Image (cartoon, rainbow, N blue to C red):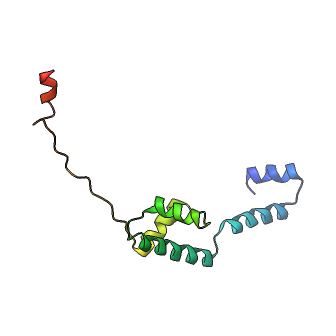
Amino acid sequence: MTHSNWGEQTLLRISQQRAWQQIQQKANRSQTPIFVILDLTTKVIEIFHSSRQNYGTRKIKVELKKQGYVVSRRRIGRIMNEQGLVSSYTVAQFKHHKTTCNDQRFIMS
């Protein structure tokens, strides 16, 4: 038993076996069941294609939240990577400037 667990054990006055059972229960609760992962995967794919392949992790997260799912952007990103989904985005366009050089306005002043 690690030092911190020993402190909890003596503080709460529980047996070592019960302390380990509680730790294992916490670990088991944090694991997501496979059917939930499959459901999330289908939802992410559905939202992605309904957005004409434009939505990224942030917008997909908002859509999932509207449907009642609480999912991190990192998990959504992992699902998108596994499924090969890449959102399209606009590339920055060249902006024309009236002056011929950036330094010209400083010389005139």
Report the front residue among 2 and 66.
Answer: 66
Residue at position x 52%, y 64% from top?
A: 63
Outermost right residue: 13
Report the front residue among 80 and 7.
Answer: 80
- Look at the image and tell me in which quarter the N terminus lies: bottom right
Report the front residue among 109 and 42.
Answer: 109
Residue at position x 71%, y 67% from top?
A: 29
Residue 39 position in % (x across, y down): 57, 76
Residue at position x 55%, y 73% from top?
A: 40
Outermost top residue: 109
The image quarter in which residue 50 lies: bottom left
Judge from the rendering whether residue 102 lies leftward or rightward of residue 8; answer left or right. left
The image quarter in which residue 24 lies: bottom right
Q: In the rendered view, would you say 92 is above or below 38?
A: above
Judge from the rendering whether residue 70 lies leftward or rightward of residue 28; answer left or right. left
Residue 77 position in % (x across, y down): 46, 64
Judge from the rendering whether residue 4 lies leftward or rightward of residue 79; answer left or right. right
